[in-house]
Amino acid sequence: MAQTYFSKDHEWIVVEGDSATVGITDYAQAQLGDIVFAEVPPAGTALEKGKEAAVVESVKAASDVYAPVTGTVTEANAALEADPALVNTSPEQDGWFFKLTLSDPSELDGLMDEAAYKAFVESL
Amino acid sequence: MTVNPSGWRPEAPSNDADAVPATFTGNTFTGNRALMLEEALLFEIGSIDRTGVDLDMSRVPAQAGTPSGVGTAHPPARVNEGLLRNRPIGLPGLSEPEAVRHYTRLSRQNYGIDLGFFPLGSCTMKHNPRLNEKMARLPGFADLHPLTPVDGTQGALALIHLVGEWLKTLTGMPGIAMSPKAGAHGELCGLLAIRAAHEAKGDARTTILVPESAHGTNPATAAFAGYAVESIPATAEGRVDLDALKAKLGGHVAGVMITNPNTCGLFERDMIEIAEAIHAVGAYLYCDGANFNAIVGSVRPGDLGVDAMHINLHKTFSTPHGGGGPGSGPVVFSEALAPFAPLPFVERHGETFVLVEEETVAEEHHEKAFGRMVAFHGQMGMFVRAAAYMMSHGADGLRQVSEDAVLSANYILRSLEDVLDAPFGASGPCMHEALFSDDGMAAGFTTLDIAKGLIDEGFHPMTMYFPLVVHGAMLIEPTETESKAALDQFIGALRSVAERAKAGDPALKAAPIHAPRRRLDETAAARKPVLVYRDPPLAAAAE
């Protein structure tokens, strides 16, 4: 059963067993505006929780996307290179950034569930 | 003799809409609008079958197997065979009048500081005095070759030295590197000196701390210099969070880059305490001097504990930006970093000026210099302009420049804070730039709409969406060179546009209406840029 978590930096992570998919939230894409470029980490990249994992560039600004958990990238979303607009049109489905294998599932405890994230966004 | 005895004055043209015949569509055969001319690309004007130059080909040695024409006119003995062009270059040929008209027409569609108010925050778009230009064109400076022996360049070396001494005095710092060629190049110079200072102590450090509100060049420079970058959050009042900074400091931190005044337009009041905390862990304080225009003559960064700072001559010292001339970013150094300043530099020995380079570094006792960043001496033409600016203002004049720049920005901040949200309006007076957010605009209206509305009003827009810590940021830097009348006109225009954004005027979403081009699709331009000309022109884009 897949479970979804959210970070304070507006990443989402869907976890199934010890593998997970990561992207940025609908709130994040709306704040960034039209995404014109996304740089995703290639398979094999070791990511550390809270450190830069990907780069997303909009008409307004370039921003880092942080790894919500520690792990190793198993697949990058190649579709984003040709069509970065997927992040705008489908941020939490087709616009995913990368998949990874979790090193330490207990790190998920520090993340928010959907209700907590919703409340967090409303507080901003 | 009586001048103009009838008292005739030209009348304003009629704006009576009824005077335009109903059959007029607004379109012209050429696409031109009266004497505002549409301009095609160079490739579309010229033809590869024409040429604007007339070489005497009989004096050019023939190349076996190469067609005649421009591009083959090399003395063959001096060009490697493999490098010789073997087919025509394919560039369009234009006559001189065609080329002159092309660029002049484009220039009429451009907007620059010589045309009007240019409130681009963080950029210090001040007037470029014409006296500077006159001095820079003096043949003794303008015609000097950088390889001229030093006994033939004493005047130029004296001028480089003079500008350096002014900058050292104004910043209260003992060392200087004049050669960096722009702000970011100066940042790199500063960080390389910091790296050299740590390495001289055998101390390998890994990290540079940068505030969230920093110019994007700061983290980029730190990464380029081989450091990991960690960001420091800001407080609610828009300044560096001192406690958060202290928590991140440690033996791994090589330096901290802080902009003061910062990009929220505020003075970092805790700078001395910040510097002490940084020095306590053996790190160095780099100050981004992009905003030095706010504090010249009032604050000496050296007194705040700064170890290195670049100075944008093209901002604070009125030399031109961008197409008007190259940037120039000299760096001043503290006692601790001064020995590591890069080559070359000018030393004064009595009445003689010496250029310290690799050959003379030992006898001048500068063995610690970290190396060289440029081939020659930096932007000589900009040094002349900056010297003219400094000497024509004097120390008291430079102080007044800063005070007037701050006064202008505060006038804008306080004149507009009733109609635009000023997120740090309660943090005290701003420095040389006023910062607003997009809070309070009607649903669907953004900072971009305000910027486009300002274009219709005849102003270059302010800096937008920077700093990143403010939502929909609008950063307005008027500089000291605008009159109160000019500021009042701008304030009136921005007030009008802001009120339309608050009221949700749909016409504002269509702005600019009066510009040579309507609102451009910036997203498509970024996602699918057309970077290569193809003949026939842009067939794909026209579909």
Image (cartoon, rainbow, N blue to C red):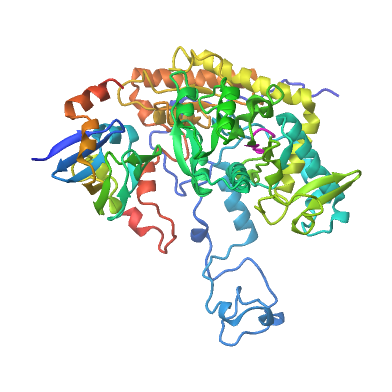
Instruction: Please say whether residue B521 is visible from this viewpoint.
Output: no
Q: Position of residue B530 (x, y in %)?
A: 40, 54
Instruction: Tally the numbered discs.
Output: 0
**Residue at image coords 54%, 65%:** B92
State whether the magenta stretch is mostly helix, strand or loop: loop
**Residue at image coords 62%, 20%:** B406
Residue B249 higher or lower than B528, as above or below: above
Residue at the outermost left position: A1
Image quadrant in which the N terminus of chain B is located: top right
Left or right side of B82 for B420 = left
**Residue at image coords 49%, 53%:** B40
Q: Position of residue B62 (x, y in %)?
A: 64, 85
Which image quadrant for residue B149?
bottom right
Residue B29 higher or lower than A120, as above or below: below
Q: Nearer the viewer, residue A61 or B361?
A: B361
Q: Which residues are magenta?
A: B309-317
Residue B232 colored magenta? no
Residue at the outermost front position: B202
Q: Nearer the viewer, residue B50 or B234?
A: B234
Q: Position of residue B380 (x, y in %)?
A: 74, 48
Residue B316 colored magenta? yes
Q: Position of residue B419 (x, y in %)?
A: 44, 14
Image quadrant in which the C terminus of chain B is located: bottom left
Residue B164 higher or lower than B297, as above or below: below
Q: Nearer the viewer, residue B195 or B427?
A: B195
Residue B393 higher or lower than A13, as above or below: above
Q: Nearer the viewer, residue B246 or A113?
A: B246
Instruction: Please say whether residue B60 is visible from this viewpoint.
Output: yes
Residue at the outermost right position: B351
